[in-house]
Amino acid sequence: MDKIDCFRYFGIEVTNIRWSWAGLNESGLNRRDTGGGAVAALTIWTDQISWDKEKKCSVWSTYNKNNELWKDDYGNKERIEIIKYCIENLKSEFRPIFVDPYKPGIFDETREAKKHYIKRDKNIWFRISNFDQKTGECEAHSFMKKDQTMESIIKKLDKKKREIKFLQGGATGLKQQKSKNYGPRKIKDEPIYPALKEQIKKIYGKDLVVMIAGGPYGYSAVEEDAHKINKILGHRIHDVAQTRPYDMITHPYNGINGLIKDFEANKIKYVVLGVINDNTKSMAPPSDTKRKIIYSSEKELVDSDQIF
């Protein structure tokens, strides 16, 4: 990811790609991170970050960093206004965009960035703890926000499932005719796969096909991903003998390398989640099953320590 991509991950279009140090998305639209509403992002030089052992958090500070060299820069003036907005409207919270310098520890007038990046596998935020509105110098402490994405998705799917059951058992006439007959519901954990898929796509991108390990048979893709694989590769769609309220395809564990070759040959971007605890013996693994990315067309995701 370059600087533009990092800001766009939070739905932010920066004022000037060359001199902007911060950006603001007041509408909250086009965010790919977890969360909603307005969000600000600030670039942070990694050599300005230290670790607070007592508070167990990272501390970013621009104090005593040759402020006289950059206090009149356009980037600093814009950042001052964005930090003010953060303090007044966002509980002083912002998302960090990390910047590795070519010359760590040298705070001169012409700092050159080696790399811009965000930590997509961690829900990291910073909170402004000290701020000088005149000079733009500031200090902020890191913290982790609880990710509500999975919880909210599961609640929505559970609600949808209850509505489907009501229509099958209680609706009459035209409403009953329009409702799809999904058959008996035997599996309590049926929303897990769609919830996992949606969580992965919200974090890493909607264009990924998500294959999820679970149960005794293999990796599964659900809903639109199942239909995409069916259309391009011809895999059979099923619903596990009418025990799922969604379409899916399943591929055997020992054939995953061949499936990956098919994905790559057809330029399909993918993520494969593998189970990392021993809950694969039942037909539908319980909700405490832990998974992580073991294969992906986006190679940097394989090194992620994110647990799903």
Image: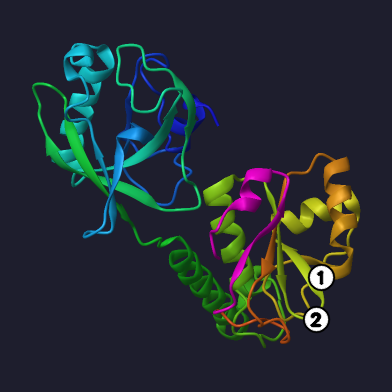
Quarter placement of the C terminus: bottom right
Q: Residue 143: within the magenta?
A: no
The residue shown at (81%, 70%) is: 238
Q: Is residue 83 left or right of residue 187?
A: left
Does residue 10 lie above or below 226 as drawn? above
Q: Residues within 10 Å of mark 1 (few under 14, many from 20)?
A: some
The amino acid type found where label 1 is placed reads His
- The percent coordinates of residue 215 (x first, y second) are 74, 79
Quarter placement of the N terminus: top right
* Residue range (magenta): 288-308
Q: Using the rendered view, name the quadrant where residue 216 is placed.
A: bottom right
Query: In front: 76, or 221?
Result: 76
Query: In front: 188, or 23?
Result: 23
- CB under 8 Å between discs 2 and 1: yes
Query: Of the numbered discs in the image, which one, if any, rests on residue 53?
Result: none
Query: In front: 194, or 87?
Result: 87
The reply to whether residue 207 is in sight is no
The residue shown at (67%, 47%) is: 208
Q: Is residue 44 left or right of residue 245?
A: left
Element marked by disc 1:
loop
- The percent coordinates of residue 2 (x first, y second) are 52, 27
The residue shown at (53%, 69%) is: 157
Q: Which residue is mark 1?
A: 238
Does residue 255 lie above or below 59 as drawn? below
The amino acid type found where label 2 is placed reads Ala
Q: Which residue is mark 2?
A: 241
Q: Residue 307: within the magenta?
A: yes
The reply to whether residue 208 is in sight is yes
Q: Residues within 10 Å of mark 2 (few under 14, many from 20)?
A: few
- The percent coordinates of residue 153 (x first, y second) are 49, 64
Q: Using the rendered view, name the quadrant where residue 146 is placed.
A: bottom left
